Image: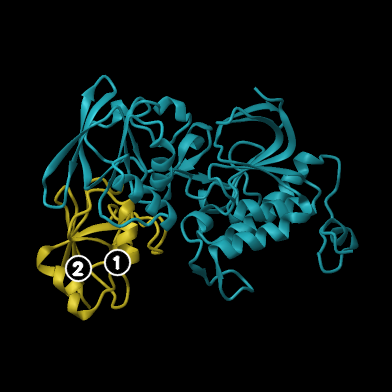
Amino acid sequence: MSDTIKTDVLIIGAGPCGLFAVFELGLLDIKAHLVDILDKVGGQCAELYPEKPIYDIPGIPEITGQGLSESLMQQIKPFNPTFHLSEMVTGIENIGDPLYRVTTTAGKTFECKAVIIAAGGGSFQPKRPPIAGIEPYEDKSVHYAVRKMENFRGKNIVIVGGGDSALDWTLNLQPIAKRLTLVHRRDDFRGAPDSVNKMRALVAAGAMDLKIGQVSELEGADGQLTAAQIKDKDGKIDRVACDAMLPFFGLTMKLGPISDWKLDMDDELIKVDVSTFETNRQGIFAIGDINTYPGKLKLILSGFHEGALCAQRVHHYVYPEKRLVFQYTTSSTSLQKKLGVA
Amino acid sequence: MPKITFIEHDGTVHTVTAELGASVMETALRNDISSIVAECGGGCTCATCHVYVDEAWMERVGQPSPSEDAELDAAFDVRANSRLSCQIKVTEALDGLIVRTPSYQGR
């Protein structure tokens, strides 16, 4: 258990809205930490459409998801936010007026005066194959991530998928596995060519197996796999004995623990007050795709606006005695000093 | 305007009017067909608008491009007639198209 991290605001989600909120908070001298389940910033822009153009950011006729993430990172640099990536917020507990204690899957604890939920479509989590009867095996012998490689030593492992995660774990686990079988639906891989070559060399050397097909059925008992059935495109079934299976089919968005935070929700979206973007819980805000209100549009530009407005209310909690004077970055020397340009 | 029929895995049939030039995925969303998810909004990066094109229509609809075929790696129960519906553009030639949605997709 680490020491408690004290900060003004904790932002859940480092997508475009979470990133821009850092800017609006920073202008008001409010410090932020950000937590994101992805291993990179940018949220959906980075995960779902890094190379796709976005045409509706005001003043920017065309920018890619990756480009927008990079520009926002440059814009918020003066405010030096701290990122906690590959972590998910699990709990929020009210311990003051308002003061929140927030915990993450990495065992970190934060204490903050406000929480801004900028979680988009929820947290990105691994896609779970819809194989009948897979549930009892999950986290016992079917894993969606490798936490400790040692747990796989000496095992018959089946890895499923054709992208970088599947290939990287194939190459990392092959040396310690009893036998490793990579299963993929087609004999073509979208992972890095170098990894594909290395994998093919191992197959050619007889050090691992490659099966072209899709897992159709699991065999085993009490959560322990004994074999996976693999169906090829002609419907022929092949049986591979295994103790562990690692499916890598990419990520999907799930609401996750947010539903347990006693927030007023409407169909997996958080209801907010449109003048402050505060939820029904004082000091907890929701901006971007995760919130809902009459007339809501799921646009990045709406999330930027929501971040600016919620910062005004957050200021009230962080500096209860200070009066907030509205200023423009074009003319205010004090704001320009914060941005490092004056 | 072309008509497209979506058949969900539970047998629910939706025959809807599609706009020329829209994608089959967009047509589904506009008509609240919840077994088309389209998490990425049409970027061919999430494989949550997976459909099985009716065999009789496969030739007219055509095969997936290499990038769509690569994205199908992130779908499940992929078959010879699998397509990502965000990559099928509605044309007059597709009037009457029938697609089925996989049982695992959607809420």
Mark toward the start of the polypeptide (2 vs 1): 2
Q: Is residue B62 above or below residue A174?
A: below
Quadrant hosting residue A186: bottom left
Q: Which amino acid type is marked by label 1?
A: Thr
Tell me the number on the disc at residue B27.
Answer: 1
Q: Residue A175, percent across and down?
A: 41, 35
Distance between mark 2 and mark 1 Cα atoms: 8 Å
Q: Which amino acid type is marked by label 2?
A: Ile
Q: Quarter of the image for the C terminus of chain A: give it.
A: bottom right
- Determine whether label 2 and label 1 are within 8 Å by CB: yes
Q: Residue A212, percent across and down?
A: 23, 49
Q: Residue A72, percent across and down?
A: 66, 60
Give the tally of numbered discs. Answer: 2
Q: Mark 2 points at which residue?
A: B4
Left or right of residue A277: residue A136: left
The yellow-tinted chain is: B
Q: Is residue A333 above or below residue A176?
A: below
